[in-house]
Amino acid sequence: MSSMKQDTRPIAVMDSGVGGISVLREMVRIMPQEDFIFFGDSANAPYGTKTTEFVRDLVISHVDSYLERGAKAIAIACNTATAAALKDLRQMYPELPLVGIEPALKPAVEQHVGGRVLVMATPMTIREEKFNLLLSRFQDRAIIYPLACPGLMDYVEAGNFDSPQLYSFLEELLWDYRNGAVDAVVLGCTHYPFVRKAIAKVLGPEIEIYDGAEGTARELKRRMEVAGILCTDEKRKGVVTFENSNPTPEKMALSKHLLEITLES
Ligand code: DGL
């Protein structure tokens, strides 16, 4: 009821760059009354080709600083950062409503039992234990091809979603998986939904494409509900603030633009 005290502290959502805005977007959609701070660590991007220890330490320090600034919940909107740091963060902050995104292998396999599923992600996500545990849970139900895609996130960071260079990069990267060679694709990096159309064009329109954004947003909402910190004032309109470790005018404009554009292919 309106007499109830509302928790309007912000939710901090973070990524190595602008990719996590594909997850932020789903969070804003299902929790429009909340305030969000989106942090892109563009100064240290890409994460996916660095060492796990380097990324884990960075992510932990970013989480610490947003908690000090009063964030009520944290979302790691980066598969790579989740693989590197989520386990440690859960141990450090057992009570905190905290979510991390991981490749949406479950829905892809469940809807394509016996099929061929391509998982596109960063080199770190593919080599880390978290993904390999996930893989072992589904490997007997589908043929799964993990594919490290170093360099793909850079196109998104540059605001390049539809150029001849992007298409030739994708054609080379996805060469073996074209012409009906796979049934489904999992976008296991939060940057990739922004080049979803280009990926679909290269692989063919019949391929189903999955990402974990919606599931992660729902999981965050659920955890916040359990913790009793969800803002329930339906009349309230939340504010999204963008922060970046390399806040050039281009990066800040791209961030706002990515929140607005539609992700549908
Ligand atoms: N957006 C990040 C992910 O979801 C990774 C991009 C990068 O920094 O390499 O995995």
Image (cartoon, helix red, strand yellow):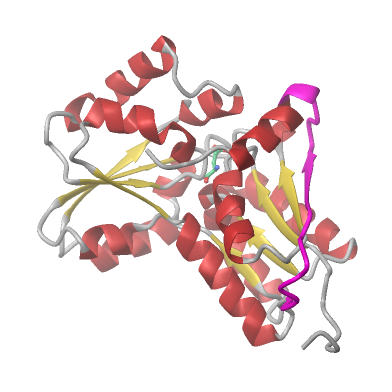
Quarter of the image containing the N terminus?
A: bottom right
Which residue reaches farthest front? 235
Quarter of the image containing the C terminus?
A: top left
Tell me where residue 213 appears, x and y as whole percent.
Answer: 49, 55
Which residue reaches farthest right? 69
Nearest the eye: 210 or 43: 210
Tell me where residue 128 appears, x and y as whole percent.
Answer: 45, 53
Left/right placement of residue 108 relative to residue 157 reads: left
In the rendered image, residue 237 lying in the magenta stretch gets the answer: yes
Q: Residue at x 71, y 39 (%)?
A: 41
Left/right placement of residue 74 relative to residue 26 reads: right
Tell me where residue 149 appears, x and y as whole percent.
Answer: 40, 33
In the rendered image, residue 163 lying in the magenta stretch gets the answer: no
Instruction: For residue 20, say whether it is visible.
Output: no
Nearest the eye: 231 or 65: 231
In magenta, the rendered stretch is 231-250
Ligand 1 located in image quadrant: top right
Q: Quadrant of residue 86?
A: bottom right
Q: Is residue 145 above or below residue 157?
A: below
Left/right placement of residue 37 relative to residue 79 reads: right
Q: Residue at x 52, y 56 (%)?
A: 83
